[in-house]
Amino acid sequence: MTFSDYLQFLLSGLTVGSTYGLTALGFTIIFNTTGIVNFAQGEFVMLGGMLGVFFLSGLGLPLPLALLLAVLATLLIGALMERLTIRPVQDAPVINLVIVTIGVSILVRGIVQIVLGKDTHALPPFTGSAPVSIAGAAVQPQSLWVLCITCGLLLLLRHFFSRTLWGKAMLACAFDRKAAFLAGIGVRRMVLLSFMISAAVGATGGVILAPLTMTSYDVGIMLGLKGFAAAVLGGLGNPFGAALGGLILGVLESFAAGLLSSAYKDAFTFVILLLLLFCKPSGLFGRRGFERV
Amino acid sequence: MGFSRDLSACGGFLVLLLTLPHLLANDYYISVLILGCLAAMTAVGLNLLIGFAGQISLGHAAFVGLGAYASGLLTTLAGWPVLPAIVCAVALTGAAAWLIGIPTLKLSGHYLAMATLGFGIIVSIVFNEAVDLTGGPSGFVGIPRLEIFGFAFDTDLSYYRLLAALLAVQMLVFQNVIRSRAGRALRAIHTAEAAARCMGVDVAGAKLFVFTLSAGAAGLSGALYAHYLEFVAPSSFGFLHSVQYIVMVVLGGMGNAWGAILGAFFLTALPEFLRAFEDVETVLYGGILILSMMFLPEGLAGGLAKLWGRVRAKRDAGEAGRG
């Protein structure tokens, strides 16, 4: 093992970790406004990639337009999910809501499987596939795109949550829904918005990663699970901790696959999740004594 | 009073199950009934978890698979007799659940669902990858049929009778658990968690007990499945099967023990009537989950009870009007 090998692991880990981070971010945003874990989060990521493939090769649209449309379509699906399935049962016990999100996740998977088929697809890389050499490690240009777009998206969201009225209103909902409602914030509208943002963020993760890892109708479960592990790692409820958790998880997984065993790399994530829940359920960046509901 | 009522209910249920094969025209349907009983065993256990502990397991098919593989491997590779192998398989499944439950059930929230989802995926990977032991994706054959103290359950009918009896006993035990200390604790948590905690109820312990029990039931069902088909393959224990068990519970009625059985038999029989089942399976499960939660949160059993109540109220009102 040389330095460049380690660098290679690090960079590929950061790349995959970006998508975990974006998925985790989506989990957190919905968790904050509604208190539910959205099991359909992974499907948003899958939809981004699969719809991108559909718009590109199915409809023959140019790449940037196809990707943009894929993200917008997923955003719309997120909005529909909230309006059609979550809002009608919003007063039901949390477990019913969680079952609804499981149902949506299965339904979306099933529909994509029927409409777009069971094949595995890949999107073309955004700018060529000739690897760039960084300190002896070969890096796909797509990896750089993934890292840059993720950073850009995080900055944008940071601005949204800390500088805009809507973002602050969403944060207020996360702190105390009732108080936010009494202060005149349309809590329902914030819930809708949180589903839209989560869907768009997830789809972006799916779109930028699809050129590197391929996509198919059933990638959502695994990505959802890893995203959730990342969210717990970062402290569920803390959006930017979640994104960081994703990066850490991606890097750990990349090293585990490279140094230990690649067949069982998915098992590794799960072990981390269990250990974490056992030792420090509030995550690395979560508030201590945070009451989870 | 509660116990004797349960006893007569379970006895009546057993009689119903035992007469069913004689009402059916075709012997083929006995195998459907057997699979229905096996699914019901798992669903009743899962129902206990979902309906009473308020927790979801997305990995129950993995517990079924663990039971099936453990018992299958012990009888073929280690050459154990069937009965101790089944007992060992159930214990192993319960132990696995217990290990997952300890960290996740301490926390309120839906950590168990994610952890079991992960567990299910890992178990699937192991079944597929550990080819030397499990035979990989094509599975392994040659598991012996069940034999207890020299009596071999060779025919489908005898096996079905055994399963029917086991299911009735399981119902009796589980109804009893609901009334036991753990069951009362869980119902107290359901009504007012803070009050229950103040009264010294061990919330995490009660949930852990129920989860372990429900996984044990799944393991038993899996072991009996292996000794019925004499063959196991990883594809019978995947994620979609875990979802299927949840659909059985939700469709039948969460927290309604008889509902889970209704859901289990309904979903097991469904592919027999729906030829295009495999293509629409996923969509169907998703649709059922969403629509049940929106329009029938108490499931078929709850819906039927409500309908019956309405019919009776109308009849009573009619009689009152006449009188």
Image: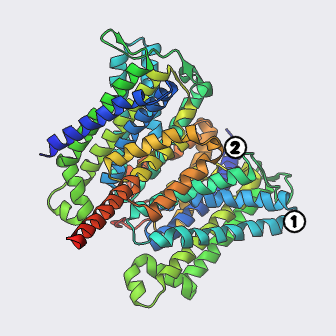
Which amino acid is tagged 2? Answer: Asp
Residue A259: name its quadrant.
Answer: top right
Give how far across and how far down residue A94 sits, in percent. Answer: 40, 64
Question: Residue at the spot x=66%, y=47% of the render?
Answer: A9
Q: Which residue is mark 1?
A: A62
Q: Which residue is mark 2?
A: A5
The chain identifier of the residue carrying mark 2 reads A
Mark sitting earlier along the chain (1/2): 2
Q: Is residue A193 above or below residue A10?
A: below
Query: Is residue A48 at all visible to an observer of this figure?
Result: yes
Q: Within 10 Å of the Cα at label 1, are there few (<14), some (14-19), or many (20+) other Cα atoms?
A: few
**Looking at the figure, which quarter contains the C terminus of chain B?**
bottom left
Q: Is residue B71 above or below residue A66?
A: above
Query: Is residue A231 at all visible to an observer of this figure?
Result: no
Left or right, B55 with respect to A212, comes to left
Give how far across and how far down residue B148 sits, in percent. Answer: 32, 14
Question: Residue at the spot x=63%, y=63% of the render?
Answer: A202
Q: Nearer the viewer, mark 1 or mark 2?
A: 1
Assess whether mark 2 and mark 1 are in contact (beta carbons under 8 angstroms): no
